[in-house]
Each structure stands twice: as C-alpha cells, then as structure tokens.
C-alpha cells in the first residue's frame, strides 16, 4: 500500500505533514503515514480524532486499499511516533495528534474536578424568583445551585436567559446571607456580538427583578472569552489567565457554548478557580465551533448518563409560534417526512418556495425592506434603519456561488438600481446594511455587529447597533465590514429576526446539514420562509455533522 493511492482524499498539507512527521521519526511504514494524514484531515473537518476502524466508511470510499483495522491499529501503536516521541496518541480505536489528546484529557480532568468541588452556604428559597408556571426554569436553577459546573441547554426561546438572570439573583442572595462580599460575575461568549447580546438580554431580565435583588447584584459586563482570558500578543491559544493565574470571578456564565472549540474550552477550564461556579449555556443541536471540537454536545452526552451529575435542560420554547417550533423540532429529530408535511401545509408562520431558481420570488421579499433603508438613511433616521434590519434576514449556507451571500448582496443592489434609476458606484451608500466581520476592541466593535449607513450633515456615517445603544462611526474607520442584504447562517448564530428567509443550496452541497438547517429556522421569531427543493431539504435533514471525539466517553 502507498499513501499516493489515497491522494484524492487529502489536501496537499495533509500529505506534507504526514511525510514530514514520518521522516523525522524514521518511520517507513506507509500505513502510519496514512494514519497521520487522516488525523490531520479530520481536524480540518472539525474532529479532534479519527476512528481507524470506521474511517473507510466515514469518508465514503471503502473501495480504496485501506489496511485491515486490527493490523493498522497494531502498527500505529508500535510506531516511534507513539512510543518514542508521542506525536500520535491512541485512545482505544481513536487516533489523535498529541495536542488534542492532551487538551481533551485536560478538559475531562478539569470538568471532573469542578464537579467534585464542594459547595457551601444556605440555599435560598426558589419560590420567590421561580413561582408557579416556571417549573422548568426552577428545576434548572436547582441543578445549578447544587453543582459548581452546570450545563444549561435549551433551544431558542426556552428561557435560558431568564434562568441565568434569576439564578444570578439567587447566588447573590446566597452570598449576602453568608456575609460574603458582592459576587464577582463574568458574562462571556465566543464572539463579541454574542457577548453583547448576552449582556443586553440578561440586563433586561435583571431590570425586572425586585429592587433588593438588583441591589445585591454588581454592575454586569460582558466580553468575549478571548478578552476574558486576556490573549497574549502574537499567540492565539495562550492567555494571561491560566492555572497559575486564575480568573478572579466567583461566577462565570458562558453563552453560545456550542461555538466553543476544544482548545478554547481547555484554556477556560484551566483558568477557572476551583471554588468558582461555571455555567455553560447553549443549544447542542446548533452549529458547532468552526474549529475542532463539539464540546457542548460531548458534555451533554458524557454527563447526561451519569447518576451523580444532572444536565439543566429547558424544553418549552416561548419565542415563536407553535408551527415554527414544531418545524424546528422535526428538523432536529431528523423527521424528513414531517418537515415536508409542515412546509407543504404552510400557514401564517411558515412558507415554502419549492424551487432551485428563486430570483423573481425573492425579489418581492427582499426589495421592499432594501428600498426602505435608503429612505430612512436620507432622513438621518438611524433608529428606523436599525429597526428595518431586525424585521427580515436572508440566510445563506454559502458565501460564494449562486446560493451565496455575495451573489445575493449584489443582486439586491442591482434590484435597487433598477427600482430607483440610481446606480450604486461605491461600497458605501445611504442605506447600506452593514455587517462587522472582525473584532475591533479599540472601537468597541465585534464580529457580527450590524448597522446601517445614514446621512449626516458632514456626510455618510455608519450607525452600529450594540447592547449599549447605537454608535456612530465614520465609514473610513470600518475596515472590516460587508454588505448585509444577506448573511451566512454561521454568522446568524445568536441573533434573531421577525422574519427569516432560508436559502438552501442544492442537495450536493457539503455545507447542507441538519444542524445548519435547524440553526437557520430557529433564527425566526414570527415567520420562516424556506427556499429550496424537496431534494435539498431531505438532503439537509439526512446529513448530520459528525465530529469524532473521545470526550463524552472519557466523562461517562
């Protein structure tokens, strides 16, 4: 067997790494080189390891000359890449690159340590903050009060934020009863936009509490996980806060945990004090991190079957109408026939455009709000412009191609030109919807922030919405910004709109997955419109994001 027989599976970098490592280790067996290549390939797909026994079926090309699993595992286990310089690690049938094996083991150890830490103090009554009708949230709060580490799961609109805010009030009351100083609380999320939304949502809930509860809580702030941990200049994976310099906070709340990679979770856990409370919040059915790992899903899977640990799960959605909730549940559960039935039935909250060429049908949907934006912008009415942005979102799986964001952004601008007779000659124009694409801590802008370009006396400026209120910037200061008549489903995580149009690519798209479809549909508060063929819908539901990991197994 030669590695060259498998080149169609790999990127050049996969083969380069395999050849380089085997050469340095003086390893001549081609099956070991193949194992290295598949491990590197798996990382690019979001997996932290690869199952050597099932890799042939997983990649979908069993006809290639794969080694026999038992012999392959034995050869890899005896390789100097495992025995002498542990570049490779085995965990049962799972093969890791050393870094990810160590990070996974560290996450497991730190999770176990937090779960084993003792909690002290009188537990306040939950009845006042979680009265009748709040049974799910009360049970979740009971779990969080008894564990140093709590995983709080639930789909959109299930009351996760309400539970977090009232739980913080309970913990503040507990500290007060024990004569302790006010709690040091950190709110964080993987992205700046998600962090800002978390703060805004929690603060709205806190503002509804009694004055005594509000007074016991400190002023809340939020940040990205990277900013919380304080990234070291020039190093994307090491931070100023670590095991020898722990975070000072008593309570740490992390939202959108499904987007947290294995590496970032490892860095967070090693920085958490043993006597702190860590609350990980998210929806394990949404899209996972763009980097390797599916930590939230692994935590739910690994801890959910234990007798000594409880997952705080919220099930009932209050965000959208019953029909959208039923559709989202059917997608999540893989019920393709039910999804088609719900889309076919339609109704006030659901619409289905069964077509691969939606141009003219989407024109009637996208052009009216796009026309209203310049009208508000010319009047300098940024509040109206920002409100229009929240009314409708076109969500795409791709950035490029006929089903991608760039195509539809240009298409809407062409329709605007046709409707107004005024060509758009520059990137910046009155009424341009703006999506920030990179964090800029100096300006207080975060990846995923949205805004609109409006006219002022001195010219055009961009007004960006934030949790603290709209902020104006000269357009020349926004180097990392895209037009947002359309946005990717990945970028939409953590946000919502009254009406959402989901544009599905053709069924052979590699990005078309159940998790992607579910995430897109659950961005809608009032109405969802699905654009795509029945074949594309069934393909999306049939295709799961499969990320190989041993974390759940380690935690059981």
Image (cartoon, helix red, strand yellow):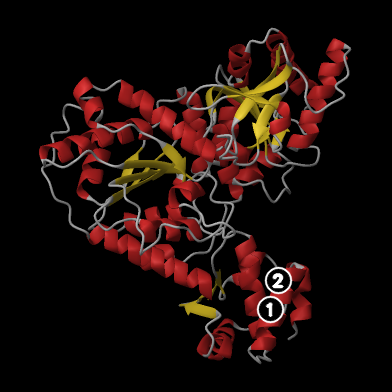
Name the residue at 48% across, 56% down: 264
For disc 2, the neighbor class at 10 Å (few under 14, some 14 to 19, many from 20) is: many
Q: Is residue 365 above or below residue 15?
A: above
The residue closer to the viewer here, 5 or 212, is 212
- Residue behind mark 1: 18
Residue 553 seen in render:
no
User: Which image quadrant is residue 356 in?
Assistant: top right
Name the residue at 64% across, 62% down: 44
Helix, strand or loop for disc 2: helix
Distance, label 1 to label 2, CA atoms, is 6 Å
Residue 466 seen in render:
yes
The residue closer to the viewer here, 338 or 106, is 106
Task: State the quadrant of the C terminus.
Answer: bottom left
User: Are the residues at dot 1 and dot 2 in contact (C-beta closer than 8 Å)?
Assistant: yes
- Residue behind mark 2: 14
* Residue 402 position within the rendered picture, expressed as x and y whole percent measured from the top left: 81, 37
Name the residue at 56% across, 40% down: 441
């Amino acid at each position: 067997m030669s590695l060259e027989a498998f080149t169609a599976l790999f990127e050049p970098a996969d083969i380069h790494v395999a050849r380089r490592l085997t050469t340095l280790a003086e390893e001549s067996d081609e099956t070991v080189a193949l194992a290295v290549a598949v491990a590197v390939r798996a990382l690019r797909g979001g997996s932290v390891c690869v199952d050597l026994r099932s890799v042939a079926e997983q990649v979908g090309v069993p006809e290639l000359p794969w080694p026999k699993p038992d012999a392959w595992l034995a050869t890899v286990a005896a390789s100097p890449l495992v025995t002498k310089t542990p570049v490779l690690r085995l965990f049962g049938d799972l093969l890791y690159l050393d870094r990810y094996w160590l990070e996974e083991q560290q996450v497991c150890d730190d999770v176990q340590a937090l779960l084993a830490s003792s909690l002290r103090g009188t537990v306040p009554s939950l009845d006042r903050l979680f009265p009748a009708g709040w049974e799910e949230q009360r049970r979740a709060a009971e779990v969080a009060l008894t564990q140093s580490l709590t995983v709080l799961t639930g789909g959109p609109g299930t009351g996760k934020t309400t539970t977090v805010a009232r739980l913080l009030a309970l913990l503040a009351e507990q500290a007060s009863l024990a004569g302790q100083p006010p709690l040091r609380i950190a709110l964080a999320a993987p992205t700046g936009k998600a962090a800002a939304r978390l703060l805004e949502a929690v603060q709205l809930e806190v503002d509804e509490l009694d004055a005594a509860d509000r007074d016991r809580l400190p002023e809340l702030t939020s940040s990205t996980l990277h900013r919380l941990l304080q990234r070291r200049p020039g190093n994307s994976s090491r931070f100023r806060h670590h095991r020898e310099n722990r975070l000072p906070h008593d309570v740490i709340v992390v939202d959108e945990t499904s987007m947290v990679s294995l590496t970032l979770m490892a860095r967070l856990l090693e920085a958490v004090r043993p006597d702190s409370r860590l609350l990980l919040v998210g929806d394990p059915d949404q899209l996972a991190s763009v980097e390797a790992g599916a930590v939230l899903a692994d935590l739910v899977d690994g801890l959910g079957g234990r007798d000594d640990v409880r997952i705080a799960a919220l099930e009932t959605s209050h965000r959208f109408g019953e029909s959208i909730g039923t559709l989202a549940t059917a997608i999540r559960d893989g019920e393709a026939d039910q999804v088609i039935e719900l889309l076919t039935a339609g109704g006030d909250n659901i619409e289905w455009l069964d077509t691969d060429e939606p141009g003219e049908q989407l024109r009637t949907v996208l052009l009216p709000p796009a026309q209203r934006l310049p009208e508000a912008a010319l009047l300098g009415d940024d509040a109206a412009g920002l409100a229009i942005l929240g009314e409708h979102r076109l969500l795409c799986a791709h950035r490029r191609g006929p089903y991608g964001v760039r195509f539809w952004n240009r298409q809407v601008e062409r329709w605007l030109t046709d409707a107004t007779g005024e060509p758009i000659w520059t990137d910046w124009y009155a009424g341009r919807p703006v999506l920030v694409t990179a964090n800029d801590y100096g300006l207080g802008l975060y990846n995923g922030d949205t805004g609109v370009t409006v006219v002022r006396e001195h010219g055009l400026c961009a007004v960006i919405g934030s949790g603290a209120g709209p902020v104006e910037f000269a357009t020349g200061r926004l180097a990392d910004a895209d037009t947002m008549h359309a946005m990717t489903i990945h970028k939409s995580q953590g946000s919502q709109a009254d009406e959402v149009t989901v544009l599905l690519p053709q069924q052979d798209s590699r990005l078309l997955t159940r998790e992607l479809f579910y995430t897109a549909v659950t961005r809608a508060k009032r109405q969802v419109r699905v654009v795509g063929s029945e074949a594309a819908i069934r393909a999306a539901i049939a295709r799961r994001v499969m990320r190989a990991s041993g974390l759940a197994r380690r935690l059981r």
